[in-house]
Amino acid sequence: MQKRPVNLSVSAEILGAARQAGINLSALFEQALMGELARLRRLRWREENARAVAAYNEYLASNATCFEGRWDE
């Protein structure tokens, strides 16, 4: 994957502590950004599919699942 330089503004105190701790800022930023993108995708999926999930839950509430009552012995 091709990488591109970016400019970020960070508190000098936090940046100094991160450097002193040996934190790889580029790797940390990439990981944090990937995590946030995944969170947003999950949120978007939930929003886009909320009606279908609610309808399915309603169906299950009024109709037994295919497994209910089969292994209750």
Image: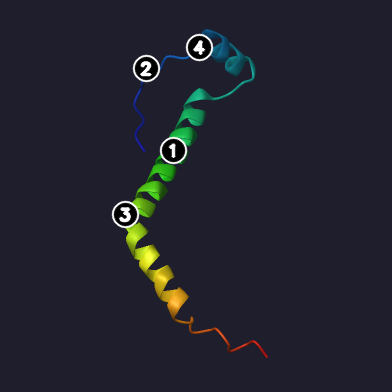
Q: CA distance from mark 2 to mark 3?
A: 34 Å
Which disc is residue 27 wearing? none
Closer mark to the observer between disc 2 and disc 3? 3
Q: Work out whether residue 20 or residue 2 is closer to the camera in this orientation and state it.
A: 20
Task: Return the x and y of residue 54 as percentages of the image width and height.
Answer: 39, 64
Amino acid type, callout 1: Glu
Q: Which residue is mark 3?
A: 48
Q: Residue at x 61, y 21 (%)?
A: 22
Amino acid found under the numbered disc labelled 2: Asn
User: Mark 4 against mark 3, which lies toward the viewer?
Assistant: 3
Q: Amino acid at mark 4?
A: Ser
How far across and down, in percent of the image, does residue 18 sit? 59, 18
At a point 47% along the width and 29% down the height, the residue shown is: 29
Above/below status of 33 relative to 21: below
Name the residue carrying label 1: 36
Labels 4 and 1: the sequence-earlier one? 4
Give the mark nearest the N terminus, 2 or 1.
Answer: 2
